[in-house]
Image (cartoon, rainbow, N blue to C red):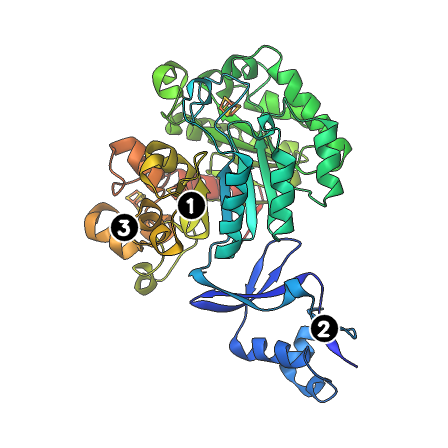
């Protein structure tokens, strides 16, 4: 009997990572050895009666990677190797236009004068993602659904084998027609809907009735069994209302709530200071209400500004700022920013950067994905590569504070965007991370969670 590759897998390879199985239904890549790769090629190209003796083949059969079926590999499953290095995700602002007037808009949509891209240029961006072997795409804006051609863009990405994993939207322009069209082409992305508190949402969004619109969008998505995450920006006024808001949101059926902190960019830098809450204030308050959050066992996951991530029903927790202890000798070699190492950001004019936040500060200085070739896009002189290809050792050469810090093996220098915001120096320390670790909150939260008997995710 002939063997073939399960339909959900495709064979791919990138520079320095030549062999991988990509699960096209989830966008996950599993890197494999040349021995496993060759076993798959052998097993799928000839009668495999004798191959089943092989330990590698038996294991691939057990894992349902190889299946018994008399067919060749589908075209999309055949091995493709890319000359660029592996990048897992692209996060793309498909427009800088929006129907809202949010006071904190980091992309300054309410006052933008930047010219966005037409349909043809958007398709050229997708062609480039395909050329670089980037299989996961999330879309943001501006407001993505303000584009009349948004479904056409999604459909084009799908036709190129690119998986739409997420859409960031204010929800107000989302219609049943959009959902039906997406479902018809097999798209089930996670929807990230902005919701900033019962009392503060309309004020922050600058539009009366925005809260109801968000609720309608959530109801529509849940009716269609699509995953919904809420993104909730914390203000001075809403900090004390977090518990109350979590209680009210428990009935909506959303999957996750992600609380975020304002940064002084875009519109917010003009008017937001008086409404800001500091990272320390958030930490203090979270430590105070953590026992209540755990006790109430909310039916969704909660991510509090990267401080703590609590899973559904308070079953487990994670501390995102703890990046996992690493041996001293490896420390110098690991990427300074793993986020940017795995993901790139494309701004509304097509400029490519490593990070949404830093990108919007200096976006137009970065190369444009439509016109630049791979060599110039990923060369070390550009902002993207400076962030993505930089090692912690490189950072240590200009940052002795992090190098000698007792928390460096778990903090790994924190976030470069935060460092930039606090000191104007991308090589500086991340003040939030310093407050968290050196201020004793890290230990305090660990002890609290131990006392509350919640397991930590490894
Ligand atoms: S909804 Fe998003 S893109 Fe639109 S103005 Fe608000 S923050 Fe900006
Ligand atoms: S806690 Fe501060 S000084 Fe220490 S590694 Fe993190 S950012 Fe650097
Ligand atoms: S600098 Fe910070 S926000 Fe930007 S990609 Fe790195 S970790 Fe993420």
Nearest the eye: 393 or 360: 360
Q: Earlier in the sequence, mark 1 or mark 3?
A: 1
Checking the image for residue 369, the label placed there is 1
Q: Residue 251, position in %: x, y?
A: 72, 27
Q: Is residue 129 above or below residue 307?
A: below
Helix, strand or loop at label 3? It is loop
Q: Earlier in the sequence, mark 2 or mark 1?
A: 2
Q: Is the Cβ of the residue at disc 1 closer than 8 Å to that at disc 3?
A: no
Q: Is residue 156 left or right of residue 360?
A: right
Q: Residue furthest bottom?
A: 50
Category of crowding for the residue at label 2, using alpha-carbon neighbours closer than 10 angstroms: few (below 14), some (14–19), many (at least 20): some
* Residue indicated by mark 2: 72
Q: Is residue 177 above or below residue 120?
A: above
Q: Is the Cβ of the residue at disc 3 closer than 8 Å to that at disc 2?
A: no
Category of crowding for the residue at label 3, using alpha-carbon neighbours closer than 10 angstroms: few (below 14), some (14–19), many (at least 20): few
Checking the image for residue 381, the label placed there is 3
Q: Quadrant of residue 419?
A: top left
């Amino acid at each position: 009997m002939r063997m073939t590759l399960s339909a959900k897998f495709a064979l791919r390879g990138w520079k320095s990572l030549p062999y991988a199985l990509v699960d096209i239904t989830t966008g996950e890549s599993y890197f494999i050895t040349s021995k496993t790769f060759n076993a798959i090629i052998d097993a799928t190209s000839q009668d495999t009666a004798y191959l089943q003796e092989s330990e590698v083949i038996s294991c691939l059969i057990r894992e349902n990677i190889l299946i018994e079926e008399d067919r060749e590999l589908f075209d999309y499953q055949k091995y493709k190797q890319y000359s660029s290095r592996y990048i897992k995700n692209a996060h793309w602002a498909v427009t800088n236009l929006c129907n809202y007037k949010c006071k904190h808009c980091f992309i300054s949509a309410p006052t933008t004068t930047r010219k966005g891209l037409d349909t043809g240029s958007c398709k050229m961006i997708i062609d480039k993602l395909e050329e670089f072997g980037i299989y996961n795409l999330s879309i943001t804006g501006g407001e993505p659904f303000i584009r009349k051609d948004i479904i056409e863009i999604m459909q084009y990405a799908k036709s190129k084998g690119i998986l739409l994993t997420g859409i960031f939207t204010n929800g107000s322009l989302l219609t049943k027609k959009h959902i039906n069209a997406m479902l018809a082409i097999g798209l089930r992305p996670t929807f990230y809907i902005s919701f900033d508190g019962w009392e503060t949402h309309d004020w922050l969004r600058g539009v009366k009735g925005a809260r109801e619109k968000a609720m309608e969008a959530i109801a529509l998505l849940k009716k269609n069994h699509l995953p919904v995450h809420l993104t909730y920006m914390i203000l001075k006024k809403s900090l004390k209302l977090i518990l109350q808001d979590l209680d009210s949101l428990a009935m909506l059926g959303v999957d996750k709530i992600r609380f975020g902190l304002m940064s002084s960019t875009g519109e917010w830098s003009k008017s937001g200071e008086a409404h800001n809450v500091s990272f320390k204030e958030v930490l203090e308050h979270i430590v105070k209400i953590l026992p209540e959050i755990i006790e109430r066992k909310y039916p969704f996951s909660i991510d509090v500004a990267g401080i703590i991530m609590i899973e559904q029903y308070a079953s487990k927790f994670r501390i995102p700022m703890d990046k996992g202890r690493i041996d001293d000798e490896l420390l110098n070699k690991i990427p300074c920013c793993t986020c940017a190492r795995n993901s790139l950001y494309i701004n509304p004019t097509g400029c490519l950067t490593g990070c949404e936040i830093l990108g919007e500060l200096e976006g137009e200085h970065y190369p444009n994905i439509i016109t630049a070739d791979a060599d110039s896009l990923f060369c070390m002189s550009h902002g993207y590569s400076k962030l993505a290809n930089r090692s912690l050792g490189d950072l240590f050469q200009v940052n002795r504070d992090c190098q000698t810090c007792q928390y460096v093996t778990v903090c790994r220098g924190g976030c470069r965007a935060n460092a930039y915001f606090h000191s104007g120096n991308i090589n500086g320390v991340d003040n939030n991370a310093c407050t968290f670790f050196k201020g004793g909150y890290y230990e305090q939260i660990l002890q609290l969670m131990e006392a509350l008997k919640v397991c930590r995710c490894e």
